[in-house]
Image (cartoon, rainbow, N blue to C red):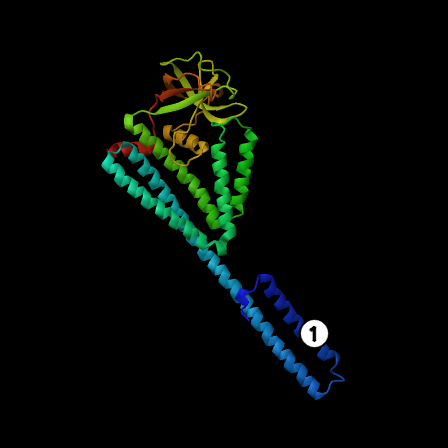
Amino acid sequence: MNLNKLPTWQKGLLLIITAGAVLLLGFFQIYTSATATKVEGALFNVLQFIFSIIFAWFLSAFIGESQFVESQRKFAIGAFRRIKEIERSINRTQKYVSLLEDEADNIVKAKLIAVNGGLSAMQDTVRSSIADWSDIIGDEIQITHETNKLKKIRNDNDEVNQHIDGSTTENITDKINALIQSLPKEIANDFESYEDTMIEECVEDIANQWLEERQLDLYCFWDSNGMFSSDVSSVKAGDRLSLSRGMTESRMGALMLFNDDNQQVAVVTNVCTNEATYEDFVEAFEAFYGRKLIPKVLNGKPLTVKVIKIEEFDHQSERQHLTVQVEQEPVHPCVFELIDDE
């Protein structure tokens, strides 16, 4: 009999049956010891010995397989973490190559397209490698997929991009946290460190954008459904506004533009080109300028921005976009490192 082909419940059933047979024979031998003949006693001993050997074999095989599966599971979790690191590296490289394509000439662009094709092939290999471990850690892989899917939904339904109930984002975040907590500690820690890495990458992304012109332009919008306390009708190019965190019924903690009356007139969009969420962007932005962006009405010290351009109202999206330029200098150490590298 090949125990490896049997499901776990059948193996457990066989173990219980053989243990029951050994106990039953022992009880029956004790019960009939006064009347049993020598031949019957010898037969009971032989049967009990045989069933004891079978029970011991089943037990050792069951425990041995459990230990083997557990060791394989630990190895699979380690391999899965390495594969996810490779996948993230490929994603970052693909984004960088795509950015280079926009400014490259035709010859260089053709080479970059070939590089991108190779990176896509590597992505297929990564997905295949993950599928190879699904028999051992299939539940963990499914949870990570579900967590990433919820993160994407949260990002797509971000309060800055759509008018949604604030509780919707909170519910999704609660689900994400619950799923992460159900994962093995090694994978859960990877998720936490990945969040920190995303913020660091977002800071570097903002720094690279600032370095091009030694200034940072932000794309903002006023939304007719955004429940702002004011609009951009009184704002014109050349005006100065303050920039800090703000709050409306549909947006919590977003970066917003305020007029001189401390009224919200627009919200800042995410400038990070990686997979950072809006919350990651806000944290990275504050780290880049070295201050918590608290509104003036709360005795905070917001940034000052200059309005560069105001676009016409878009009736289809019911939004009006404007571009502003941050007037303060960044203080994050990575800025000085980039300047020294030039």
- Residue 39 position, x and y percent, is 69, 87
Q: Residue at x 61, y 78 (%)?
A: 50
- Residue 17 position, x and y percent, is 65, 69
Specify the farthest residue to the right.
Answer: 35
Residue 112 in view, yes or no: yes
Front residue (pair 306, 141): 141
Q: Residue at x 29, y 43 (%)?
A: 115
Looking at the picture, does residue 319 appear above or below residue 132?
above
Front residue (pair 318, 88): 318
Query: Would residue 332 appear left or right of 62 to someone viewing this image?
Result: left
Residue 184 in view, yes or no: no
Q: Which residue is mark 1?
A: 24
Q: Residue at x 46, y 46 (%)?
A: 189
The secondary structure type at the circle numbered 1 is helix
Front residue (pair 164, 228): 164
Q: Amino acid at mark 1?
A: Leu
Q: Residues within 10 Å of mark 1 (few under 14, many from 20)?
A: few
- Residue 296 position, x and y percent, is 46, 19
Front residue (pair 246, 102): 102
